[in-house]
Image (cartoon, rainbow, N blue to C red):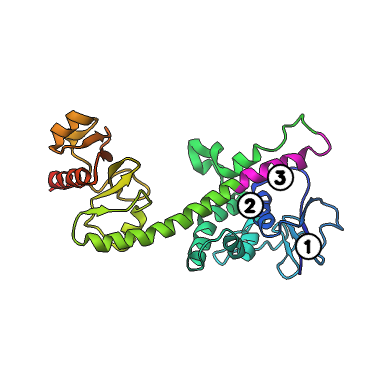
Amino acid sequence: MTIMQLVTHSGGFHADELLSSVILTRLFPEAALIRSRDAVQTTPGAGKIIYDVGRAYDAEAGIFDHHQRPSPLRDTGQPYSSFGLVWRHFGHDYLRALAVPEESLDSIHHSFDQGFVLPIDLMDNGALEPSVAGPLAGMTLPVLLETLKPVFDARGADADDAAFMAALPIARAFVEASINGKAAKARAASMVDAAIVAAGASPILELPMGMPFRAAIEKAGADHLLFVVHPRDEDWAITTIRKSGDSFEARADLPEAWAGLTDAALEEASGVVGAKFCHNARFIAVAATRDAALRMAARAVEAVA
């Protein structure tokens, strides 16, 4: 069936139907996006997808609302918003439209659902208070997207619709950046896995370029690794490995004697010709050549022992 209409409610908007529109307009670019509360428009029919309005959830009929009772729930008992329902039924096709490899489809679908979609669902249903974000409560994505609504005294006849359409590419940028980042991490993981095998028992991991590596190292159980070396533009970087994604604490820091030094001073402190820079926080250093970077990494390992 050809989809010719994407129907959501008119008036003020929230993150859930805006983000649902990101998914659906990508999949059905020829369909008209209609914002209405008219019963004729919000009643299921051939060639329609209706979401966040209509007070029914029936995927076969093409309607995805969550405001009715009983409201649709995940297997965990957590509530869906329209975004969660749309992602549940159209997420895999959306990932294919973004050229995500088939072998990564399920894992990225699940990761995006849990890390991006679910928080939107919970906030939209009042099951998660924005205040849990503490001082950053005003910086959450749902709040930021809602700031794109018209202000109270800018109330032209089509003000809400115009603001919605202006907000749509902004919302799309966040969704696609998240998906592209997850796909990139999946590509990087296979490269890191190969590098771990090549490194063997060495505590130094050499990568062919800068890329996300911590999660892959952790998944591989490569607890012996302490530092990562890789080319960076015209030079080479030596970086530490954070203990977890929730902490800046590293498995091992670069030597304290290198902190904040550059060029000749760092060459003298490290004993390595070609040493160029070490960050004052000791999580990254830079060398002029691959050989110098590997020798700096080796000296850093010695300092830890």
Q: Is residue 73 visible?
A: no
Seen at 75% across and 40% down, the residue is 162
Residue 115 visible within the image: yes
Return the disc, 2 or 1, that comes first in the chain's sequence. Answer: 1
Q: Which residue is mark 3?
A: 13
Q: Amino acid at mark 3?
A: Phe
The quadrant of the rendering that contains the N terminus is: bottom right
Q: Which element carries disc 3, helix, strand or loop?
A: loop
The mark tally for this picture is 3
Residue 252 or residue 3, whichever sits in front: 3
Percent from the top left, x then y, of residue 147? 64, 37
Task: Give the residue type that dot 1 points to.
Answer: Lys
Distance CA(mark 2)–CA(mark 3): 14 Å
- Give, as a single range, the part of the protein colored magenta: 156-172
Front-most of residues 125 and 167: 167
Q: Is residue 288 left or right of residue 61?
A: left
Q: Crowding at label 1, few (<14), some or many (≥20) Cα neighbours within 10 Å? A: many
Mark 2 surroundings within 10 Å by alpha-carbon count, few (fewer than 14), some (14 through 19), many (20 or more): some
Q: Residue 109 in magenta?
A: no
| Residue that badge 2 annotates | 125
Q: Earlier in the sequence, mark 2 or mark 3?
A: 3
